[in-house]
Image (cartoon, coloured by chain):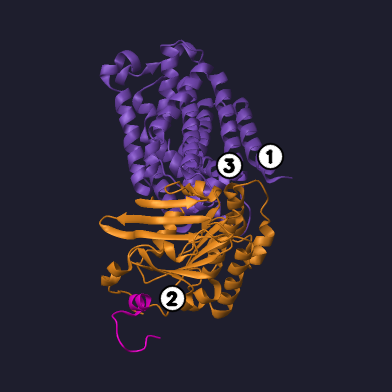
């Protein structure tokens, strides 16, 4: 059996089937929806960080751009929600295009510049002078398109597509080229890889995923404020989940979300003070003992992790 | 060997070494022609009008003291730096300033002084990615044979980070060869190799030349240069001061001065 097919059968299929069926046995659909959102977002982050090594602290900027792209298309253009979702995706990709010069930076400089860029977008969107267009700081209400059951299904579909994309990267020449760029951009050039073009494609794919997720998030909750969709906590969650599980794999980010977001919801809601403590200990332990993430436990034993 | 030669004598040799070659009368036309190449870093002219040419199947040595511009020359030809002046002509076509991947597709590749493999990828993946993206014409690289010829086949599934430095150098070479280059720039491949390995690598480079690949070899080990090259360019302060066989170079007064310092009546070895 080819590796890619095995990856589809052992990661994509079980995750997607589980989240498609869970609402019929578990009533808290919002919680499940949030899991789906983070599963997709973490994989989107994995595309840019895991495969090319750029750490986008402002990743939430694309999420917010997707949410507002969706909302503006519904409010002003009266697009049907699925078409508005496309507008959200395009908005995020356009933002990604505007930010491509940031890819000239690396390491912490890139992370900080990207963080600043996402905050700039947040400040523009929430500017009271733009109230006529974006509703400024007063928030958005899209009750006309509210349809949680259907939207949940769309979110699962986006998750499936995102997992498919990461499986492609994990098994394709293009994914190998991206990893080569991550390891050494100069050597990648000498391997004949168009470094600038390849990393730009990865960057835009990553933005596209976050834009779609942001759009479907806006659609699902339908009432939100700029602070909701440009919350840096979204970036941080996606980053921590992916690093916890292990980047540049398919399974790592999935494990990260299930375990950490699971803990967050089990104890973070009832006894938040313990949650902070346990979270802190987990992350410190991870950095000290498993800097490559959970999946490195298997990798070290020579087990091929999807 | 004195690393800081006096360069006061540059005026009396004029500039280039272009004229020292055989001209255009010979059968094989030059594949690569470097004309008056200049590269500046701030006020420092790392390359200051370097000129030479390279024919298919030829092994050209680039020698000279530290800081004489050898590695800079390779970096400019392979697209890491843009030239600030002069021309690089491949088959008569100007290629100076093209990005590395375009140059790779035109048939130019290199190894690095400090090997730069893709550390977390396996040895095989390192070569695969170059074979997939680096070939200028359709064709298949026989990765197994390539790994075997560089004694990397038994490590094919290990990450490149686990190789020792000599193996990493061979992996650098394997990655370059996977792109089926016409011109191979070899930057201090021999440094750190033991005599038996030197011998094998030398034979390997000669075999590549026999396949009509043109090689530029930058090296400090004169024995190795003597073993593999047909002709050397001696660089000093960013320009060529001698072109010809190594045996003639070591009898050249200016070359001796550059390597051994001020003129002295004592015997220069």
Question: Mark 3 near mark 2, Cβ–Cβ under 8 Å?
Answer: no
Provide the secondary structure element on which disc 1 rests: helix
- Image vertical order of residue A270 relative to residue A138, above or below: below
- Image vertical order of residue B265 relative to residue A222, above or below: below
Q: Quadrant of residue A236?
A: top left
Few, some or many residues within 10 Å of mark 2 (<14, 14–19, 20+): some
Few, some or many residues within 10 Å of mark 3 (<14, 14–19, 20+): many
Q: Closest to the observer: A2 or B204?
A: B204
Task: Tell which subunit mark 3 falls on.
Answer: A
Question: What is the display colour for chain B?
Answer: orange
Query: From the viewer's perspective, is B150 left or right of A220?
Result: right
Which one is closest to the eye, mark 2 or mark 1?
2
**How far is the residue under mark 2 from the one under mark 1?**
66 Å
Q: Which residues are magenta?
A: B253-269
- Image vertical order of residue A199 relative to residue A130, above or below: below
> Does the magenta-highlighted stretch encompass residue B124?
no
**How far is the residue under mark 1 from the one under mark 3?**
16 Å
Label total for image:
3
Q: Quadrant of the N terminus of chain A?
A: top right
**How far is the residue under mark 3 from the one under mark 2?**
53 Å
Task: Determine which residue is flagged by label 1.
Answer: A9
Provide the secondary structure element on which disc 3 rests: helix
Few, some or many residues within 10 Å of mark 1 (<14, 14–19, 20+): few
Q: Are marks 2 and 1 on the same chain?
A: no
> Does the magenta-highlighted stretch encompass residue B261?
yes
Query: From the viewer's perspective, is A165 left or right of A65?
Result: right
Label drawn at residue A169: 3
Task: Determine which residue is flagged by label 2.
Answer: B249
Check the image and name the residue furthest to the bottom: B266
Question: What is the display colour for chain A?
Answer: purple
Residue at the image position 28 percent from the left and 80 percent from the top: B262
Q: Closest to the observer: B226 or A248?
A: B226
């Amino acid at each position: 059996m080819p590796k890619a097919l095995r990856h589809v059968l052992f990661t994509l299929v079980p995750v997607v089937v589980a989240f498609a069926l869970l609402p019929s046995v578990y009533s808290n659909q919002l919680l499940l929806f949030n899991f789906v959102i983070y599963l997709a977002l973490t994989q989107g982050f994995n595309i840019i960080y895991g495969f090319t090594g750029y750490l986008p602290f402002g990743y939430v900027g694309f999420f917010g751009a997707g949410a507002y792209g969706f909302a503006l298309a519904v409010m002003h253009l009266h697009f049907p929600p699925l078409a508005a979702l496309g507008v959200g995706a395009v908005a995020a990709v356009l933002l990604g295009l505007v930010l491509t010069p940031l890819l000239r930076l690396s390491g912490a400089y890139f992370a900080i510049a990207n963080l600043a860029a996402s905050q700039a977008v947040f400040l523009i969107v929430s500017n009271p002078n733009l109230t006529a267009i974006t509703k400024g700081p007063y928030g958005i209400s899209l009750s006309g398109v509210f349809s949680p059951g259907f939207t949940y299904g769309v979110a699962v579909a986006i998750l499936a597509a995102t997992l498919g994309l990461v499986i492609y990267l994990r098994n394709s020449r293009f994914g190998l080229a991206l990893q080569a760029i991550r390891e050494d951009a100069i050597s990648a050039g000498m391997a004949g890889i168009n470094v600038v073009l390849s990393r730009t494609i990865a960057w835009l794919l990553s933005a596209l995923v976050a834009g779609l997720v942001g759009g479907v998030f806006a659609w699902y909750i339908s009432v939100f404020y700029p602070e909701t969709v440009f919350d840096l906590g979204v970036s941080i969650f996606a980053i921590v989940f992916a690093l916890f599980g292990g980047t540049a794999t398919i399974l790592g980010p999935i494990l990260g979300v299930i375990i950490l977001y699971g803990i967050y919801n089990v104890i973070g809601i009832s006894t938040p003070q313990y949650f902070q403590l346990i979270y802190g200990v987990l992350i410190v332990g991870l950095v000290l003992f498993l800097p490559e993430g959970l999946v490195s436990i298997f990798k070290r034993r020579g087990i091929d992790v999807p | 060997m004195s690393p800081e030669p006096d360069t006061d004598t540059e005026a009396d040799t004029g500039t280039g070494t272009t004229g020292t070659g055989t001209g255009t009368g010979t059968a094989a036309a030059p594949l690569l022609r470097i004309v008056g190449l200049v590269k500046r870093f701030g006020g420092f002219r790392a390359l200051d009008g370097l000129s030479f040419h390279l024919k298919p199947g030829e092994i050209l040595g680039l020698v000279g003291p530290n800081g004489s511009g050898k590695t800079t020359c390779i970096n400019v030809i392979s697209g890491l730096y843009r030239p600030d002046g002069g021309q690089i002509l491949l088959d008569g076509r100007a290629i100076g300033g093209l990005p590395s991947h375009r140059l790779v597709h035109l048939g130019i590749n290199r190894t690095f002084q400090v090997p730069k493999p893709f550390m977390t990828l396996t040895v095989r993946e390192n070569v695969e990615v170059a074979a997939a993206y680096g070939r200028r014409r359709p064709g298949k690289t026989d990765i197994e044979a390539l790994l075997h010829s560089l004694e990397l086949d038994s490590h094919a599934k290990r990450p490149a980070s686990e190789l020792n430095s000599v193996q990493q150098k061979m992996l650098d070479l394997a990655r370059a060869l996977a792109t089926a280059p016409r011109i191979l720039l070899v930057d201090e491949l021999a440094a750190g190799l033991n005599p038996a390995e030197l011998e094998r690598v030398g034979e390997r480079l000669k075999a590549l030349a026999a396949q009509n690949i043109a090689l530029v070899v930058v090296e400090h080990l004169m024995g190795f240069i003597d073993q593999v090259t047909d002709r050397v360019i001696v660089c000093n302060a960013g320009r060529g001061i001698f072109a010809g066989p190594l045996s003639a170079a070591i009898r050249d007064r200016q070359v001796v001065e550059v390597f051994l310092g001020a003129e002295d009546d004592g015997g220069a070895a």
